[in-house]
Image (cartoon, helix red, strand yellow):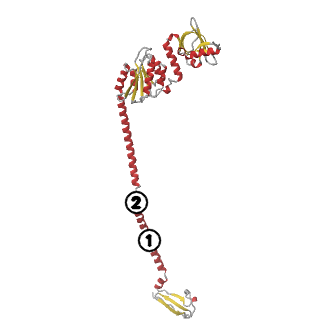
Amino acid sequence: MYQALSITEVTTYLGELLDVHPLFSDLWLVGELSEFKRHAASGHCYFSLKDERALLRGVMWKSAAIRMAELPRSGDRVLAHGKLGFYNPRGDLQIYVDALLPAGVGLLYARFAELKARLAAEGLFNAERKRPLPALPRRIALVTAPDGAALQDLLNILRRRCPLTEVLLVPCLVQGERAPASIVAALSQAYQAGVDLIILARGGGAPEDLWAFNDETVARAVFASPVPLISGVGHATDTTIVDYVADMGAPTPSAAAELAVPELAELRELVAEAQARMTNALTTLVTSRRAKLTQALHTLERHAPLRRLARQRQQLDDLARRMERTVGTAASLRQLRLRGLADRLAALSPLATLARGYAIARHADTGLIVTAPEHAPPGTPLQITVRDGELTTIVQPPTQAARPEKKAR
């Protein structure tokens, strides 16, 4: 028994069918653009694609529109890339477009341009994420066809320029429908091989022959490389998506090999320069350290305990001699002074006066020196001191003094 369905159920079912169908999720259409409008507020673009017999509604969201250098106009014949969907509210079948290109460029170029713009918007081409190549890689992985001319060119140049570098071949297909999956598997194997650098390469050919290197899965595998990666695909005029994603894009496989390793002669020059710099640095360091050691030895000698002791002994001897001279001089001066004082004392001594014939009269009772006649009236007992002893006498009354005799002339 059949059951009636709602409009929503039908449109939802049709939308789910379109979402899971592989053809409608990665679709290229060619047709004439009509009714092209860009919404001022949201920035989304709304249009129709038509040919002689049919018309299909289209939508391009703002995120895709801003990647276009110039928006197309109604009447342009274009290639549109996107996926089919079902707009439930109106029951419209429409294509959600992420790239619009002039129809004359060809489908291959249109697919290339669409993928390039999308990956660039995601940041896969940003210069700041690209890593510098190692100066001297010890081990390099070559991801390329094992029977191609590119491999021989790579090996010849790597052996000639730097035979010290170990080379690991990781073979893969580089052309055909199975090539993208083979390249991705080979890259995964190279990532686990413990190499310092990877070269992804193939020789020249038609654009269709190189298309595996414009595959999105290959580009994302290159982006995931844990070590620097060089792409060398085709001839100098060929450019692929992996060239934009790789850390370094070389115009040819041979150029990739030359970028990967330095010339052996250059290495010898670098080693010689480094050895000369090291020798100069060591010589300067040894000279400087030797000068500092000599200065330290001189300082140690000046401050050595034995040297200080000898110097202090000499200083002690000098001080002793100076003290002896000082003490001797002071003693001599004191002796001279004492001698002078003794002479002065001797000259002033009463004994010296007595020696010259003088005498000293003292009151015999009181012991006072008699210096005037009134101090010793008659009858006063006196003690007379002379040079050789003492005399005792009593003062007599005065008598008439004898006339003094005149001295003969």
Q: Residue at x 39, y 42 (%)?
A: 285
Amino acid type, residue under disc 2 in the picture: Leu
Q: Quadrant of residue 194?
A: top left
Query: For this rendering, which residue is in front, 92 or 253?
Result: 92
Query: For this rendering, which residue is in front, 50 or 296?
Result: 50
Q: Which residue is mark 2?
A: 309
Total numbered circles: 2
Left or right of 18? Residue 268 is left
Give the crowd class for mark 2: few <14, some 14-19, many >=20 residues within 10 Å. Answer: few
Secondary element under disc 2, as helix, strand or loop, is helix
How far apart are labels 2 and 1 at the CA level?
32 Å
Left or right of 353? Residue 285 is left
User: Taking 96 as reference, is 276 above or below it?
Assistant: below
Residue 363: percent from left, percent from top: 55, 89
Check the image and name the residue furthest to the front.
1
Residue 16 appears in the rendering = yes
User: Taking 11 as reference, is 199 above or below it?
Assistant: below
Secondary element under disc 1, as helix, strand or loop, is helix
Residue 37: percent from left, percent from top: 61, 13
Disc 2 and disc 1 in contact, CB within 8 angstroms = no
Q: Counting residues from the N terminus, which is met first, the one under dot 2 or under dot 1? A: 2
Q: Quadrant of residue 87?
A: top right
Q: Please identify, in this view, whether the residue under mark 2 or under mark 1 is nearer the observer.
A: 2
Query: For this rendering, which residue is in front, 120 or 178?
Result: 178
Q: Quadrant of the C terminus?
A: bottom left
Q: Quadrant of the N terminus?
A: top right
Query: For this rendering, which residue is in front, 82 or 246?
Result: 82
Residue 96 appears in the rendering = no
Q: Quadrant of residue 12?
A: top right
Q: Which residue is mark 1?
A: 331
Residue 357: percent from left, percent from top: 47, 86
Amino acid type, residue under disc 1 in the picture: Ala
